[in-house]
């Protein structure tokens, strides 16, 4: 395994772990009213300082490996699902920020709207991320 692949897998692991922790935090947040939900601020901080840098590292290391990647359907599908997960996760980060700003402004209607859309888009982040992980594992093992 090359050092670049190792770095990519570390970045992917950090990103996946971050998403897993955020899922648990979001489930816990449902027991708090929007006005006093500390998870909104916490989630935005995690996005800023952990998740977004991990996404950038995944993109950079993935792009650096691209010229030497084989053009098999498994690899191409893995790249497609991975890029989908990254793109949707960027949308989710924007929704997390919007939700937090709405909370600070006392805009509970905006908070609820951003929260609902975050859940809807987040499901597809997880689905596309899992498909990319499985395809990556199939390629590495097979």
Image: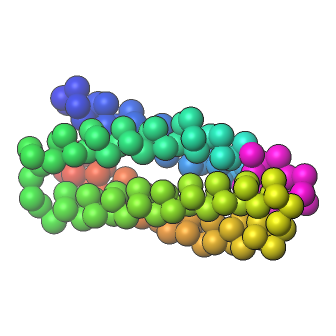
* Picture mark count: 0
User: Would you say residue 125 is visible in this rendering?
Assistant: no
The residue stretch that appears in magenta: 26-41
**Is residue 37 one of those drawn in magenta?**
yes
Please say if 106 is above or below 39. Answer: below
Lateral position of residue 127 relative to residue 44, left or right:
left
- Residue at (15% x, 48% y) in the render: 66
Counting from the top left corner in percent of width and height, residue 75 is at: 19, 57
User: Would you say residue 82 is visible in this rendering?
Assistant: yes
Residue 128: name its quadrant: bottom left
Counting from the top left corner in percent of width and height, residue 110 is at: 75, 70
Q: Residue furthest front?
A: 105
- What colouring does the structure picture have? rainbow
Residue 82: name its quadrant: bottom left
Magenta-colored segment: predominant secondary structure: helix
- Residue at (22% x, 26% y) in the render: 3
Lateral position of residue 108 relative to residue 94, left or right:
right
Quadrant position of the N terminus in the picture: top left
**Is residue 52 one of those drawn in magenta?**
no
Q: Give whichever of 65, 46 is nearer the camera.
A: 46
Lateral position of residue 101 relative to residue 89, left or right:
right
Lateral position of residue 75 relative to residue 85, left or right:
left
Counting from the top left corner in percent of width and height, residue 5 is at: 24, 35
- Residue at (57% x, 41% y) in the render: 48
Counting from the top left corner in percent of width and height, residue 87 is at: 41, 61
Q: Give whichever of 29, 137 is nearer the camera.
A: 29
Please say if 116 is above or below 95. Answer: below
- Residue at (37% x, 64% y) in the render: 84
Q: Give whichever of 53, 12 is nearer the camera.
A: 53
Q: Give whichever of 70, 95 is nearer the camera.
A: 95
């Amino acid at each position: 395994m090359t050092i670049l692949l190792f770095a990519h897998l570390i970045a992917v692991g950090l990103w996946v772990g971050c998403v897993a922790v955020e899922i648990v935090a979001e489930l816990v947040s449902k027991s708090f009213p929007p006005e006093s939900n500390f998870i909104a601020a916490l989630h935005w901080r995690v996005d800023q300082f952990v998740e977004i840098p991990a996404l950038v590292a995944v993109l950079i290391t993935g792009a650096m490996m691209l010229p030497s990647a084989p053009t098999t359907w498994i690899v191409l599908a893995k790249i497609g699902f991975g890029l989908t997960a990254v793109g949707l996760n960027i949308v989710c980060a924007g929704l997390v920020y919007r939700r937090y700003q709405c909370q600070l402004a006392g805009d509970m209607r905006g908070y609820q709207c951003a929260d609902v859309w975050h859940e809807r888009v987040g499901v597809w982040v997880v689905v596309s991320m899992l498909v990319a992980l499985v395809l990556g594992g199939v390629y590495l093992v097979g």
